[in-house]
Amino acid sequence: MKSPPSRHALAVVALTTALWLPCSVPALANAPADSAASAIAGQPLRGRSLYRYWGFEVYVASLYAAPTFVAERFEQERFALELQYRRAFRGEDIAQRSIEEMQDISPLPPEQTGVWLATMKRLFPDVSPGDRLLGVYRPGGGASFYLNGQPRGSIDDPVFAARFFGIWLSPRTSAPQLREALIAATPR
């Protein structure tokens, strides 16, 4: 019997779909004009790791950040996180798991949980093996997202963006070994 994907694996897929959040999250801006390559220019690879769940390859995560990036203050730093998927996931499942991951790190107010969950369920796409999803975090501004190198959109909600990227970068993540691999080359 096949085990369902982990909460973390599903939450990760949410990265790809966060770009589709509607205006109920403070703002969904037009797609950024630049490419994924220009979005991470000057942001060298800091860490990369294959994430597995019960032996199944889920995705390869890569963190791009300035040499001065400090993981303990990730909310104050510009960075990019790319996920290259090895498995398919449904967008609706990703939304639910993303909220659960955020809640496990730190409780959300019920009204915020409802807004973010409904928004993500409506908008998160299904992801196929080989898809590359890149999220660029802008401290205090939100996040921009790219699918397979092409701009998809921006979410101008700094609270959502910090909580969302905390799924991978918070010290309280459910995948501490993945976090350690991603931040291995960053100053402590």
Image (tube, helix red, strand yellow):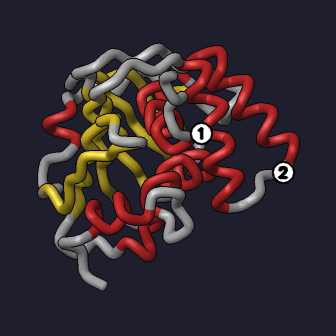
Q: Is residue 32 left or right of residue 30?
A: left
- Check disc 1: other Cα within 10 Å, few if <14, some if 14-19, many if 20+: many
Label 2: state its secondary structure.
Answer: loop
Of the numbered discs 2 and 1, the one sitting upstream in the chain is 1
Q: CA distance from mark 2 to mark 1?
A: 15 Å
Which residue is under mark 2? 109
Quadrant holding the C terminus: bottom left
Image coordinates for residue 146, horizontal then vertical, percent: 31, 28
Name the residue type under label 2: Pro
The extreme right residue here reads 110
- Check disc 2: other Cα within 10 Å, few if <14, some if 14-19, many if 20+: few
Residue at image coords 39%, 18%: 88
Q: Is residue 138 left or right of residue 82?
A: right
Which residue is under mark 1? 98
Give the label, 2 or 1, closer to the camera. 1
Residue at image coords 43%, 65%: 176
Image coordinates for residue 172, horizontal then vertical, percent: 56, 67
Relative height, residue 145 to residue 55 (above, below): above
Q: Is residue 12 left or right of residue 174?
A: left
Image coordinates for residue 41, horizontal then vertical, percent: 13, 48
Residue at image coords 33%, 15%: 128
